Amino acid sequence: MAPADTPRLMLSGCPMAVPNWKLPYVVESAGAVIVGEESCIGTRNSRDLVDESGTTMDEMIDALVDRYMKIDCACFTPNDERLENVTALAKAVKADGVLHYSLLFCQPYSHEALKVDKTLANAGIPMLSIETDYSMEDVEQLKTRVEAFMETLA
Amino acid sequence: MIIGLDIGSRSIELVAMEGREVVHARRAPTTFDPVSQCAGLLDGLRPASLVGTGYGRNLIQRLGIECEMSSITEIKAHALGAIHLFPQARAVLDIGGQDTKAMTLSGGRVIKFEMNDRCAAGTGKFLEYTAGVFQIPVEDFGSYALKGSNPPEISSMCTVFAETEATSLMARGTPPESIALGLHRAIVKRTVNMLGRVGFSLPLVFTGGVANNPCVLDLLCHELKAEVGRDILIPDEPDMAGALGAALSLA
């Protein structure tokens, strides 16, 4: 359990494949808590589940297709609903700020970081954009960024 | 007495304050034994509180000093130092040994910041390394570059590739001062991009050791169409701003 005044951060962006816990580790050891995750291992995975009410093969296939078409990953275009979904999730989980994570060379997310930043800024939600990879050598630099971001929220 | 200790990648600065008055300002190179360097700087001082900042901010715990200890990031420290020295500041640019940081301020707080990624290209380290290639002390590199004209476009920001590029330019007969100017221009371009990403406005306080480089300053003024003293403000000791801000976080 974290104290009531602990900064609440939400993750957005690339999925963090197990066991890539670098960023969550940095965030939570800096004294914040992660309260939500928008990614293919986060709410994108569990939201918009397939409608199971179809009784014929066609209906069921249509239901599957409908679900696929709602995926708002940065590698699809247009995906304006991603901006709405990130903002809505940040509000729903009462995030004090959003950490936008993109893996090095994952250009779709690196580009969308700018759009997400603008959208969140309009909603009054601060965002920090982070680009990193699976190696551990930038942990100290990440710590400085995350801690400085938390200082701006305090 | 409150002491702010900025343990950076290249140098360590100490600022001691009594109330809101600076009573000591000291500096030392970081070396590979920053803890001993800090102990040397603290010699004869008895702080009630010690605030660490910079990469080595948590090393203060290893100093074995009995006092209240805390740490803040160099982002906050430079902002606090800059605002204290220039209350009208709207943005801060800090170019240190290993990092470039751009911040926008509002109401005495940092609103948005950017830092270079893990690579130290375009920082003090880049200048130090390239000055070495020209066999010039880093302190004199800026005035040396100012003697250049028609600077060639240096497209590599990687320190190692920039050296290769400089070497090819030398082989082509480009005057070394002009190559040096081109290298400075490459840094400033990168810095201005970073400032653009945080949506800065003027006046801007320029801190960190690189603020002492007259060529970087000259080019920055040119790029931002700004004037030193009005739009770009430089502390008397720009490298001390972080340690000052650390001390001020408690003062």
Image: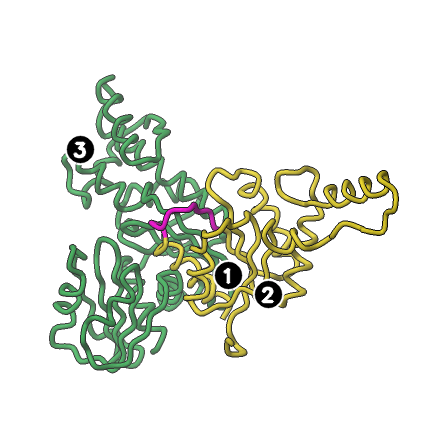
Q: Quadrant of the N terminus of chain B?
A: bottom left
Residue A30 drawn at (x, y percent)? 42, 66
Residue B78 drawn at (x, y percent)? 36, 62
- Give above or below for B51 relative to A77: below
Dot 3 or dot 1: first in sequence order is: 1
Residue at image x 26%, y 27%? B164
Q: Which chain's colour is green?
A: B
Same subunit under labels 3 and 1?
A: yes
Q: Report which colour depicts chain A.
A: yellow
> What residue did someone put label 2 on?
A95
> What residue did someone put label 1 on?
B111
Residue at image x 68%, y 45%? A72
Residue B134 disc label: 3
Q: Secondary structure at mark 2?
A: loop
Q: Amino acid at mark 1?
A: Ile
Most foreground residue, A105 or A46: A46
The stretch in magenta equals A130-138
